[in-house]
Amino acid sequence: MESALRHPIILLTLPVFAAAIVAVACSGSSSSDSEDVTGEEDAGSSVIPPGSEPSSSSPPPGPAGSGLATGLPCDVQGILENRCIACHSTDNPPPLLDYDDLKAPSKKDPNKTMAQAALAEMMAKTMPPTPAVPPEDDEIATFAEWLDAGAPRNPSACTDPPPDGGAPGDGGATDGGAPITVKCTSGKTWDLGNAGSPLMNPGQACNACHQQQGGPNLRIAGTVYPSLHEPNNCVGSAPPPQLTVVITDSRNRTFNLPVNAAGNFSTRNGEQPRPPFKAVVRNGQQTRAMVGSVTSGDCNSCHTVNGANGAPGRIMAP
């Protein structure tokens, strides 16, 4: 496999392949244009009518990041998925994966719930710990609003399982049961590690990495590829033609995220889409739509080389 991307400038001079494939990276802030369209209904609001235990007809329970019912409001669940579960997914540190986890007594102060302790840490800017970037004001306000309302349980799932089943009729992609073949279509890889470039680490889980390594806060980020099963750090799809990932949030606002010369896309500072989200990859009049909706903006955490949590594999260009 040919190695490329030893410097971001090299990427801009690579030959254009027949499929217009170049490199993708999973980090940094790409420039994007956003257009707000105010909707009447806020499906992600954390202030929901207090709910009791989910009924037998409720969606099956599951942890944050699974696409199942966590018992949490969608926007609170989104904060946990983007800010917390990269570390808080096992017994040490304590899990923050669902409603029961957040209502459990705090390990440090049994007089507080884990949710109350988490809010105090967020307000003090001590969680997530350095080198992670502290929570932003709107994230803290959302979490506090839910607690002030009595921390009501949400009996519904925030996503439409499977989160991205890849049904071709809905614009997705699927192997159809065929054997999986992993290939780097571009034949080019990123080999500069965490170089602090928006072209870095294509295919890797951007948000989780940034929380652990101290990169910028990315609300939504991922990588677009020309095929379903491409390895990490393989260069993905890039212009020409220009690809755009269009995000629609729970308030019916749209955010247009250009796919950069490495195939990566991300929200920029100040953009605050509210979960759950829907996504469409657009190439002019051609589109590929995600099946269902998700609360996590860490796209590559599900769109892995083989797919996870219902995703069939990589995000594919139309």
Image: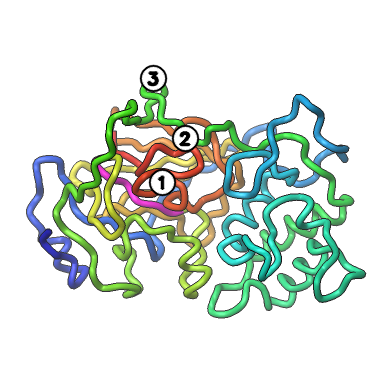
Pointer 3: what residue?
Answer: 169
Q: Mark 1 Cα within 10 Å, few/some/many (few <14, many 20+)?
A: many
The reply to whether residue 42 is visible in this rendering is no
Location of residue 280 with respect to 83 vertically, above or below:
above
Pointer 1: what residue?
Answer: 303
Q: Earlier in the sequence, mark 2 or mark 3?
A: 2
Q: Type of residue at label 3?
A: Gly
Q: Whole-percent x and y of residue 38?
A: 61, 37
Check if residue 223 falls in the magenta segment.
yes
The residue furthest top is 169
Q: Secondary structure at mark 2?
A: loop
Q: Which mark is residue 46?
A: none
Q: Secondary structure at mark 1?
A: loop
The residue at the point 78 percent across, 57 percent down is 102
* Image marks 2 and 3: residues in contact by CB distance under 8 Å: no
Check if residue 260 falls in the magenta segment.
no
Q: Type of residue at label 1?
A: His
Residue 189: quarter of image: bottom left
Q: Earlier in the sequence, mark 1 or mark 3?
A: 3
The span shown in magenta is 221-227
The residue at the point 87 percent across, 40 percent down is 50
Q: Earlier in the sequence, mark 1 or mark 2?
A: 2
Pointer 2: what residue?
Answer: 164
The residue at the point 73 percent across, 46 percent down is 72
Marks 1 and 2 sit apart, C-alpha to C-alpha, by 9 Å
